[in-house]
Amino acid sequence: MLAILNMAEIISKPLVGIPASQIYLPAQSLAQHGVGERYIRGVSDGANAVPMIIPALAEDYDFADLADRLDGLMLTGGRANVEPHHYGGPPFPDDEVRDPPRDNTVMPLIRECIKQGVPVFGSCRGIQEINVAMGGTLHYRVHEVEGFNDHRMPREGDIEHKFSERHLVVTAENGMFHKTCGRREIMVNSLHAQAVDEVAPGFEIECVSAPDGVIEGIRYTQTSAFCIGVQWHAEWRFQENALSNGLWKAFGNACRERAVVRSGVENSVE
């Protein structure tokens, strides 16, 4: 019998869902659903998959059916933070940016994808969504926690400066991230205020920031299915970063395996 990975070469590219953020335009009284192109390119170029934007329609979905149609799920960054009622945290201040439709779309979708073995990859807000959906908690403002540095986006400078590499992450020895890039330390960008606090059950820490130890990478270990989150923007110039590039490729391989299993091709080969 041919191996699943060999069969993956003869089927169509895997389909990866990318949940959108809802953007409300008060002047036009309109809501829009959007995903940054860099995430779409991460899926199409980094994972070699077909990206599909999933509108933030929340309760309109049958999440079991939606997950069953996907070969992968990519969770993006976003302007709004995960609302604290999802993890038992104190309420946001009145001026905090919120996106309830996205929260209410991704939380059940993450759980269903993990249940069905759909590969999941989260970047920035994405790691926070994964952790919260599976029972973990967040620091609302990590720079206000004693011992942690300011990981927020620089206020000045152009886009290249804002997304430039700003600190090291240290990977767990012989962990998945270490094996992916072959290094214990690697530089990453940093554009976040929230961060993982208590890690969700079933997840292991794959890397932390140096020198302050903020959790920067987690991996689900209760099944063989691919499920990781990273706190940096792994979609930004991923070809130039050995760890980000390796994770995109690993995600793409997992999605292709899922596509083969979902298609039933391997069952038809002697």
Image (cartoon, grey):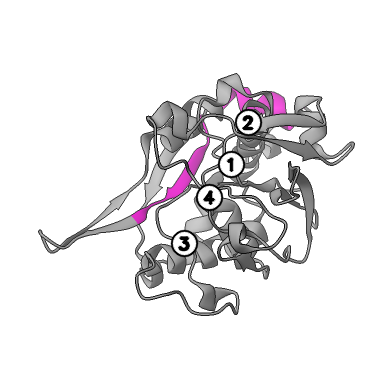
Q: Which residue is mark 1?
A: 232
Kind of residue sitting beneath label 1: Trp
Label located before the other in sequence (3 or 2): 3
Q: Tell me if I can see residue 270 in this picture.
A: no
Q: Answer few, some or many: residues within 10 Å of disc 3's Cα (few below 14, many 20 plus, some between 14 and 19).
A: many
Which residue matches tag 4?
A: 192
What's the CA distance linking mark 3 and mark 4? 10 Å
Label 4 packing within 10 angstroms: few (<14), some (14-19), many (20+): many
Q: Give the quarter of the image for residue 98.
A: bottom left
Q: Please name which of the two marks, 2 or 1, marks the residue nearer to the observer.
A: 1
Expressed as whole percent of the image width and height from the top left, the position of residue 243 reads 69, 29
Q: Is residue 214 magenta?
A: no
- What's the CA distance linking mark 2 and mark 1? 9 Å
**Are circles 2 and 1 on residues that touch, CB within 8 Å?**
yes
Spatial CA distance of label 3 from label 2 is 23 Å
Indicate which label's residue lies in the foreground, 3 or 4.
4
Residue visible at 46% across and 47% down in the picture? 17
Q: CA distance from mark 1 to mark 3?
A: 15 Å
The residue beneath circle 3 is 81
Q: CA gap, disc 4 to disc 1?
A: 8 Å
- Which part of the image, by quadrant, shows the C terminus? top right
Residue on which the image places disc 2: 244
Mark 1: which secondary structure? loop
Residue range highlighted in magenta: 2-21
Q: Give the amino acid at mark 2.
A: Ser
- The answer to which image quadrant residue 31 occupies is bottom left
Amino acid of disc 4 = His
Q: Secondary structure at mark 2?
A: helix
Q: Quick one: label 1 or label 3, which is nearer the N terminus? A: 3
Please tell me which of labels 3 and 4 falls first in the chain. 3
Mark 3 vs mark 2: give the one in front: 3
